[in-house]
Image: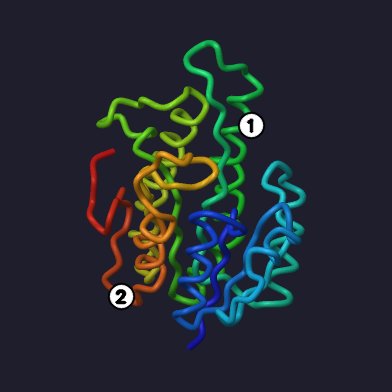
Amino acid sequence: MTRTALVTGGNRGIGLEVVKGYAEKGMKVILACRDVEQAKASLAGETMGDIHPITLDLSSHAAIDESCSKVTAIYGDIDVLVNNAGILHQKQGTEASTEELSESMQIHLNGPYNLIKQALPAMLRNGFGRIINVSSGWGSFTEGMEGPLPYAVSKAALNALTANLAKQLAASGQNVTINSVCPGWVHTRMGGKDAPRTPEQGADTIVWLGTLESDCPNGKFLRDRQEISW
């Protein structure tokens, strides 16, 4: 059976490697991003398989609803949802503006929650689903919440969403799970040139979780396929 995955922020960096990883596994992949032309340029010369770039604007709930309706109509139900799109405002503490915090919460929490609400009913109905939220150690209380305030707070909120929804999914009795993943400090446009990890390394746990047919963790925070503390 061919699974269908939707990956936000899939036009570069970790997201692009997740898209490629799922396509290599024979999945149909919906590459969701703001710039479809950039996505097509990133895929130029690739013979990776069944990849379909679409425009998805996480800043608008109406746009999210419209895009999800089109995806379902054209490509069918979403089996694997990867909330990877991110934004990094660099200001610390109260130097960060309320607008920067609001935008970070929209991209890292509200948008993903809307996507989950769109995809989850079919997952439960079909008895299979994998929801993977791309988070960060900067959003971990155990690691000291060390990132810039808008990023750290919104990623911590994404982790809280994961932990809370995992209880509902466990109670459903269906093979549907939700997890958060910290890809580590990755050499991407967001991570910077000094980051020690490759996008492929950052994507590995995400691809792994999305391709587990059974015995998948639920409600965990993972790095390098191992559970880490919140």
Tell me, yes or no, whether the two marked residues, 1 and 2, touch with CB atoms within 8 Å: no
**178 or 51, which is in the foreground?**
51
The reply, left or right, for residue 213 in relation to residue 153 is left
The amino acid pointed to by label 2 is Ser
Q: Position of residue 179 (x, y in %)?
A: 37, 54
Q: Residue at x 51, y 73 (%)?
A: 125
Left or right: where 155 falls relative to 11: left
Q: Which residue is at the far front?
A: 193
Which label lies toward us, 1 or 2?
1
What residue appears at the point 49 percent right and 33 percent down from the top-left corner?
154
Q: Is residue 25 left or right of residue 76?
A: left
Residue 214's tag is 2
Viewer-closest of 210 and 65: 210
Q: CA distance from mark 1 to mark 2?
A: 36 Å
Label count reads 2
Q: Secondary structure at mark 1?
A: helix
Q: Which residue is mark 1?
A: 103
| Dot 1 amino acid type | Glu
